Amino acid sequence: MKVFTFLSILLVILPFGHVWCDSVDNLRQDLDRVFSKVGFEQAIWGVHVESVNRNEVIYTQNNRTLLTPASNQKLLVAATILDALGADFQFQTELLAGGPIENGVLKGPLVVRGGGDPSIGGRFQGGDRLSIFKQWSRALKEKGIRQIEGDIIGDDDLFDDIPYGKGWQWDDLPYWFAAEISALSFNDNCMDLIIQPGKSLNTPAVCITAPPTDYIEIINRTQTVSQRPKQRDEMKEMLYRRCNDGRTVIMEGPVLLNQERFQEYVTVPNPTLFTVTVLADVLRREGIDVTGNPIDVDDLEKPLRAETLKNLFVHNSPPLSDLLAVLLKRSQNLYSEIFLKYLGRKKAGQGSTEAGARAVGAYLKRLGIPDKEYDIADGSGLSREDLVTPAAFCALLKGIAQGKNAEVFRDCLPVAGESGTLRGRMGEGPTAGRVWAKTGKINGVRALSGYIESREKELFVFSFIVNNYQTAGKSAAYLQDEACKRIAGFSR
């Protein structure tokens, strides 16, 4: 009797993940304590934990309450497009001749037809933003083209012309996570701003745009300072904003004299025109004379006639599995928005968010998830009009885990302590390398949904979403991590 009492006391006082014996009831009690911590009394926690191996619901709290999911929304799009297209699918961008090629001269426009590839830029090219355009230049030369006697036309008609998600906030629009959506995209539809302090105090910081282009005008009002202002009413960090014309960016604020060079990203208006503008610059630098101008297909006086266009070559994106790793590990909003519209085009012939949402809904229905458990406003989770229940996320994750794409999908997720947005979280103890999950974060929202493997290799799906909290965001993340540690340390 004394031995039993001693072990019972140890069971209570030993920290999470270090119990000698365990039970589902003990796990539930511990999760109750985690999600009832002070500081979240006015907030709403939605929680669902389920064993995939045993088909057993372990813990729930408001698991069928519709909550704002932030970037957990990307799980819906990623799962649907992987199921629809397969891991090896590649997006295609076509280069088309709008006239005959005579004596090295293309007698007509060069048309770049976007196919929804979000990866044109430097991410898969060792950081060289212009590498793909240089490849295209070489391909044109191999076709004998040394001059283009016409315009460079960007064709983005695969998608509609709505550049933003439903319910996006206007003050987010200059920042990379709210880049405009287009079927023809380049450099994440952003201009990179490489910034370093001036040579002396009170001089403007040095700003270099990448790629080099005059598509965006920079008005530099920054100031090199020895230390940041301490007064509350003074600006404490460098800021940038787009003017109403979209193509003028004002930079202002302090930059420390001893600061290392750093990088910011400002979104560009009309990514299609941005793409062909930079392409035209590259073609000229690579020795192909362009006599015309970069033009968005929507600005043509007469529509293109398909029968007059001749295919020159096709550029293929990296495989979808690589793109999904960017989407989920880096939480790249643009990828998810493009994928959602592509789903709409493929499934319904309409490259719109609404058609894409219906395609996602059809996939969720196949997994047994009723439409009352979600409301899709965009693909990335930037919109506060997105609503999903924790139970729906877990049903989705469980369905994937039991299907053909289980391994591919899990490999695309951030891993605790190792990769993506979880690189700096849960890197020690039972969770290290054994939590695969998507984070989500906007003001007042923290979400974490994914997979946990216990010490005994039992696989759990989980979704932890908190809305409407007023405490620091790291406090919510800490509680999510504590819950993950408890589940990862669970032993039957």
Image (cartoon, rainbow, N blue to C red):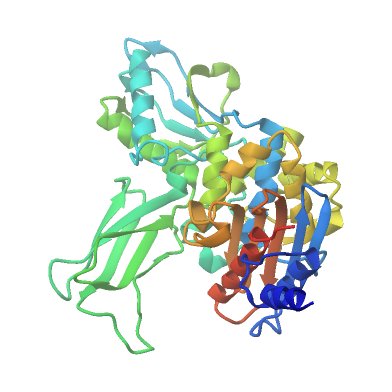
At horizontal 77% and vertical 44% (from top left) the residue drawn is 399
At horizontal 42% and vertical 64% (from top left) the residue drawn is 243
Question: Is residue 210 left or right of 419 when viewed as pictured?
Answer: left
**Where is residue 463 drawn, in percent x and y?**
71, 60
Nearest the eye: 443 or 352? 443
Question: Is residue 244 left or right of 205 when viewed as pictured?
Answer: right
Quadrant in which the N terminus appears: bottom right
Nearest the eye: 387 or 235? 387
**Where is residue 258 drawn, in percent x and y?**
19, 70
Residue placed furthest toward the top: 103
Q: Quadrant of residue 147?
A: top left
At horizontal 32% and vertical 71% (from top left) the residue drawn is 252
Q: Quadrant of residue 236?
A: bottom left
Q: How many marks?
A: 0
Question: Is residue 279 left or right of 311 when viewed as pictured?
Answer: left
Quadrant in which the C terminus appears: bottom right
Viewer can see residue 159: no
**Where is residue 80 drawn, in percent x and y?**
71, 41
At horizontal 43% and vertical 21% (from top left) the residue drawn is 108
Q: Is residue 18 above or below residue 308?
A: below
Viewer can see residue 197: yes
Nearest the eye: 307 or 211? 211
Q: Is residue 311 above or below residue 34?
A: above
Q: Quadrant of residue 323?
A: top right
Q: Is residue 108 above or below residue 237?
A: above
**Where is residue 393 drawn, in percent x and y?**
74, 55
Residue placed furthest toward the left: 200
Q: Is residue 66 above or below residue 400?
A: below
